[in-house]
Image (cartoon, grey):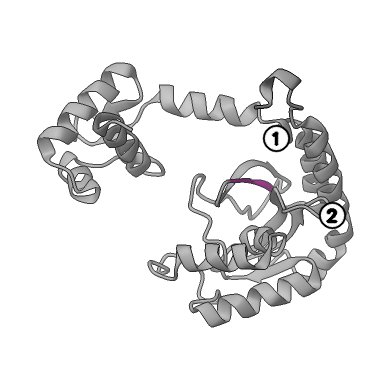
Amino acid sequence: MSSTLLRALTILDLLTGKPHGMRLSDIATQADLPKSAVHRTLAHLCAAGYVKQDPVHGQYLLGLCMVSRAVRHLANLPLVDVAAPLLDELAAESGELVRLSVADGDTLSWVANRQGARFGLRYDPFPGREIRLVRASSGLAWLSGLERDRAVALIEAQGFDNLDGYGPRGPSTRQAALAALAEVSELGYSYTDSTFELGTVAVAVPIREPGRDAVGALSIAGPSVRFLHADTIRMLPKLRAAADDLAVLSSAASPVPRPDDVA
C-alpha cells in the first residue's frame, strides 16, 4: 500500500465519529505524521469531496460524499435489506430501540435501527460510536456466537483502556469480561444494565446458523426506568425468533460464487 493512500485512510479513520471535526495539528499528532504531509493529503481529500474544512474555525470534517456513500452502502447490504420488516415489528411491539449489528472481520458495527418509542423518553444513542464488545449487549451476544479462542482474542485486542465514557457496571478487567462472556454463552442471550451507557438496559442475541460463527447480533435497548428486566424477558422469544429468521435470510442472501469465480 502506498504511503499516500495509507495517510488518507488513516485521516479518514480519525475523522470518523467526529461531528465537530479535528484541527490539522490534532490530526497530525494522532496520526503521528508531519503537518505538511497531512495538509497535502487533506487538500486532495477535500478536492475529491471526502473531507471538508469548516470555513470559520478551520477544522476538518468528513464530507457529505463520504457519508452518503457509506449510508448508501449500508442500505444495500443484503442483511440490512431483509431485516427491515423484522426490525419494524420488534420496535412496534417493544416500544423501544431495536438495532441490528453486523460483523465485518474482527469488528462489529450497528448498521440499522428502528425506534419504537413514539412519545416520552427515548433512547437515541450517538450514531457511529465504537462498540466496546464487552460493554455492549450486542457485542457480548456476538462474541458468544464465536469460537471461544477467537472471542477471547478479540476481547484482549480491544483491551480495557479509555472506558471513562461508558457505563459504570461493565467489565473492566479480562477476568470480569471472560466471566460475562461465559454467562452469556450459557444463557444464549445478553442482558446489560448501565454497562454501555448509564441508565440504559439492553437485551441481545447472536445471529447465527447452527455450526457457524455468528454474523452479527440483534438487540432491544431502552431507558432502565421504563424498559424493565421483565420487559426484556417478555421480548426474548420474539427477539430470538427474529434472529433465527435473519440467520437463514442472511445465508440465502449471500451471493453464491459462480464456477468461474472460484480459483
Q: Residue at x 69, y 60 (%)?
A: 146
| Quarter-of-image position of residue 46 | top left
Q: Position of residue 161 (x, y in %)?
A: 39, 69
Q: Nearer the viewer, mark 2 or mark 1?
A: 2
Q: Mark 1: few, some, or many residues within 10 Å (few <14, many ≥20)? A: some
Q: Which mark is residue 80?
A: 1
Q: Residue at x 50, y 75 (%)?
A: 168
Q: Quadrant of the N terminus?
A: top left
**Do we see residue 97 in this rendering?**
no
Q: Position of residue 80 (x, y in %)?
A: 70, 35
Q: Amino acid at mark 2?
A: Pro
Tell whether position 101 is magenta. Answer: yes
Residue at image mark 2: 210
Q: Amino acid at mark 1?
A: Val
Label 2 residue SS: loop
| Quarter-of-image position of residue 143 | bottom right
Q: CA distance from mark 2 to mark 1?
A: 21 Å
Tell whether position 204 is magenta. Answer: no
Q: Mark 2: few, some, or many residues within 10 Å (few <14, many ≥20)? A: few
Of 75 and 228, which appears nearest the observer?
A: 75
